[in-house]
Image (cartoon, rainbow, N blue to C red):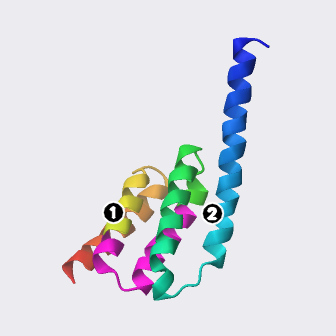
């Protein structure tokens, strides 16, 4: 094996491990009850999923998890955390194309949350 082969195999092994972990977290996210006592668990899973999806360039899937993340904070009436989640989601989006409208909407929602 050449050094390029070893590097490719190493990267592939890491990617496969990440994918396996992604599916484990996805199953956990689906199974976590949407009740206040499991709030922190659900949020932790969302944060990990967002980080992972961003790291592999899956913008659409990360946006879906961001939506879930914001809705969790809304459901549990975490105003400050919801506002921060909205700002983080907006920061993730660009000012170009279809992201522009979504980003503006998220920033407007965050402003409302922080002003209430």
What is the magenta range? 63-83
Q: Is residue 78 magenta?
A: yes
Residue 82 vertical position relative to residue 77 in the rendered view, above or below = above
**Residue 9 — which label?**
none
User: Which of disc 2 and disc 1 is earlier in sequence?
Assistant: 2
Viewer-nearest residue: 60 or 39:
39
Image location (x, y in percent) of residue 23 = 70, 59
Quadrant of image for the N terminus: top right
Viewer-nearest residue: 112 or 2:
2
Q: Which is closer to the viewer, label 1 or label 2?
A: 2
Q: Residues within 10 Å of mark 1 (few under 14, many from 20)?
A: some
**Residue 87 — which label?**
1
Q: Is residue 27 magenta?
A: no
Image location (x, y in percent) of residue 28 = 64, 70
Residue at the disc numbered 2: 25
Q: Secondary structure at mark 1?
A: helix
Q: Secondary structure at mark 2?
A: helix
- What residue do we see at 26% from left, 78% from top? 112
């Amino acid at each position: 094996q050449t050094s390029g082969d070893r590097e490719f195999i190493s990267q592939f092994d890491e990617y496969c491990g990440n994918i396996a972990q992604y599916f484990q977290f996805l199953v956990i996210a689906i199974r976590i009850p949407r009740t206040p006592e499991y709030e922190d668990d659900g949020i932790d899973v969302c944060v990990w999923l967002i980080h992972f999806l961003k790291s592999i360039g899956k913008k659409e899937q990360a946006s879906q998890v961001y939506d879930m993340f914001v809705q969790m904070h809304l459901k549990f009436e975490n105003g400050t955390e919801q506002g921060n989640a909205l700002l983080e989601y907006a920061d993730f989006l660009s000012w170009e194309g279809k992201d522009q409208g979504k980003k503006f909407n998220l920033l407007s929602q965050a402003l409302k949350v922080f002003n209430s």
